[in-house]
Image (tube, rainbow, N blue to C red):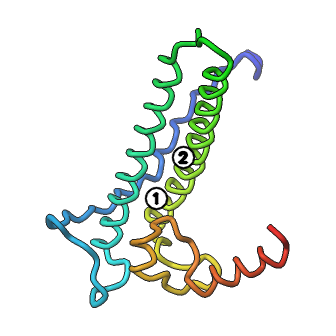
Amino acid sequence: MSKAATKTKPRPMPAPDVSPLPERPDLPTGYRPKPGEEYMSPEQLEYFRQKLLTWRGELVEESKQTIDNLREEVRDVGDDAERATRETENSLELRTRDRYRKLIGKIDKALKRVDDGEYGYCEETGEEIGLDRLEARPIATLCFDAQERWEHRQKLMGD
């Protein structure tokens, strides 16, 4: 029998390296991060994860409503003025939806940073972003000083 004719046994595939996901803490009702706590403790990370997921869900729902409204709209509009008004409204709705799409992308990146343990720390300096800033802007990636430097550079560049 030739070598080409001999069949080799398929080798079993190695099991994928699957590490168990860390347990997520159960947050007490009404929990909010406090300055005296360990920064980006499991409880704080879970708090911001839930905050981001809730915000994402609200944006997705609003986007679905926009699509439904545009589909249900009657295309047979009376006069030119009414048609122009509807076109303007539709354009605003679509721009809003596009902003939501971009914001959802930023939320997804923030959720990935939560999972990677990088959430809450400045991408430029590695410093803490701060609880107050994250409460106000949960998708923040820069600490206050780095954000000011970035805005100053943008202003100089004319953007």
State which quarter of the image contains the C terminus. Answer: bottom right
Residue pictured at 19% horizontal, 65% vertical: 27
Q: Residue extending furthest left?
A: 29
Residue under label 1: 111
Across and down, in percent, residue 72 comes to 47, 17
The answer to whether the residue labelled 1 contacts the one labelled 2, judged by CB atoms less than 8 Å apart, is no
| Quarter of the rendering containing residue 62 | top left
Across and down, in percent, residue 131 comes to 39, 80
SS at circle 1:
helix
- Classify 10 Å Cα crowding around label 1: few (below 14), some (14-19), many (20 and above): many
Q: Specify which label sits upstream in the sequence, 1 or 2.
A: 2
State which quarter of the image contains the N terminus. Answer: top right
Q: Amino acid at mark 1?
A: Leu
Residue 100, numbered label:
2
- Classify 10 Å Cα crowding around label 2: few (below 14), some (14-19), many (20 and above): some
Residue pictured at 28% horizontal, 86% vertical: 37
Residue pictured at 56% horizontal, 36% vertical: 93
Residue pictured at 51% horizontal, 18% vertical: 73
